Image (cartoon, rainbow, N blue to C red):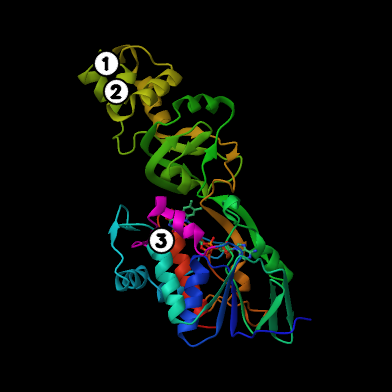
Amino acid sequence: MPSTMPSHDAIILGAGAAGLMCAAVAGQRGKRVLLVDHADRPGKKILISGGGRCNFTNLHTAPDRFLSANPHFAKSALARYSPQDFLSLVERHGIGWHEKTLGQLFCDGSAKAIVEMLLGECERGGVALHLGHAASAIDHADGRFRVTLGGVVHDAPALVIATGGPSIPKMGATGFAYDLARRFGLKVVEPRPALVPLTLGGDDVLFRELSGVAADVVARTGKTAFREAALFTHRGLSGPAILQISSYWKHGTPVGIDFLPGRAQGWLREAKRAQPRSTLRRQLAEALPERLAVTLAERLGHADELSALTDRRLDEAERTLSAWSFTPNGTEGYAKAEVTAGGIATAELSSQTMQAKRVQGLYGVGEAVDVTGWLGGYNFQWAWASGVAAGQSL
Ligand code: FDA
């Protein structure tokens, strides 16, 4: 038994986006908070996010831009801490920002500014930061949580699981949150890589020759569609449209790509009338990168001049081009996934406070929970909002 047992009001495991925010809010409410991370520095994912400029929120945040077994769960926290609230914090700290596209807000400078801002807020709240040690033992008895860190047992009536998901394991990301939640009897929705490139096999493998080629497309799976850029890679498909659709994609199902979004029906017939000596490849090259136009025309098998093709064949070509079907054979997995979908089941948590309904004092926040945002700042907004919800309740 160690000689000292430091006591806190709350121990927060994980000094990432959600843990830092939760700690700052609770600390500034006068709570004695211990914030723990096994990494040697806090907020590592924030530092690499948004290409080093951190896409810290999205102005179009709305509950329908998050995936969860319970689509209503995120509503309360998101409504109580909005993108504008985070933006006000960013501005109070004098951090320059800009909107890139589609409501995505980025730092003008380095993502470091966001980590420093959160650390500053933690300092204002007197948060004790403990880095470089994994919690080696976690016990729960008599309504108290005991966490052993470097041989010292710390004690608190509240424990927050903010250790994120296993995406990018080489950065220290783990499935620790799920193991811990299960130990306390909480259900976990099967985790899976999301916002992740898709891989191609079989016939589709030929498209790998297009590695590096990008095009503005509509990508579809089931009833979900995203219009953004798609990128061919040496393993399959990536780019924002594909990353977005990957979160909804189910193994064994096709992904449909509209290579010419917005084209009116019958455009190829019209092209034939206007330029009968043109070819399908030339028509496609007007809207698409040359290499892609060549490959699509070859795969459609229409090398002849348009005048030699019947209207029916042109209509068929149009239909194929607007719903080209790829059946990915998988994803690039956690090594390349920007987030992990699934996680601590929302049915186990209060949507107001993030506290476990059946374990007094236990909380789950951020990516560890079964709430996953679209690409574009939504995942950080969830981390901030759920961190604030828990921080106000601790
Ligand atoms: P987060 O992963 O941030 O923090 C978890 C913390 O727990 C880490 O510090 C980790 O070291 C620690 N930890 C893990 N296991 C532990 C253990 N056993 N003991 C102690 N500590 C432990 N989102 C967005 O909105 N905009 C963007 O621009 C980007 N960009 C982006 C780029 C890349 C490359 C990736 C991988 C991800 C993004 N994201 C993003 C997603 C975003 O980074 C992610 O959703 C949030 O960081 C989640 O915040 P959390 O605090 O929940 O987990």
- Asked if labels 2 and 1 touch by Cβ distance under 8 angstroms, the answer is yes
Q: Position of residue 18 (x, y in %)?
A: 50, 68
Q: Position of residue 384 (x, y in %)?
A: 45, 69
Residue shown at 43%/65% (left/top)?
115
Q: Which mark is residue 278?
A: 1
How many labels sit on residues?
A: 3
* Looking at the image, residue 185 lies above or below residue 281: below
Residue shown at 38%/63% (left/top)?
113
Q: Left of 296 or right of it: where is 248?
A: right
- Closest to the observer: 374 or 273? 374
- Closest to the observer: 138 or 255? 138
Q: Which mark is residue 283?
A: 2
Q: CA distance from mark 3 to mark 2?
A: 47 Å
Q: Which residues are magenta?
A: 41-66
* Looking at the image, residue 149 lies above or below residue 246: below
- Closest to the observer: 83 or 299? 83
- Asked if labels 2 and 3 touch by Cβ distance under 8 angstroms, the answer is no
Q: Position of residue 93 (x, y in %)?
A: 32, 71
- The answer to whether residue 374 shows anywhere in this view is no
Q: Left of 2 or right of it: where is 381?
A: left
Q: Residues within 10 Å of mark 2 (few under 14, many from 20)?
A: some
Residue shown at 79%/81% (left/top)?
1
Q: Give the mark, 3 or 1, whose residue is nearer the N terminus.
A: 3
**In the rendered structure, which amino acid carries the disc numbered 1?**
Ser
Queried whether the magenta region covers residue 139, the answer comes back as: no
Q: Read off the residue under disc 3.
A: 112
**In the rendered structure, which amino acid carries the disc numbered 3?**
Lys
Q: Residue furthest left?
A: 274
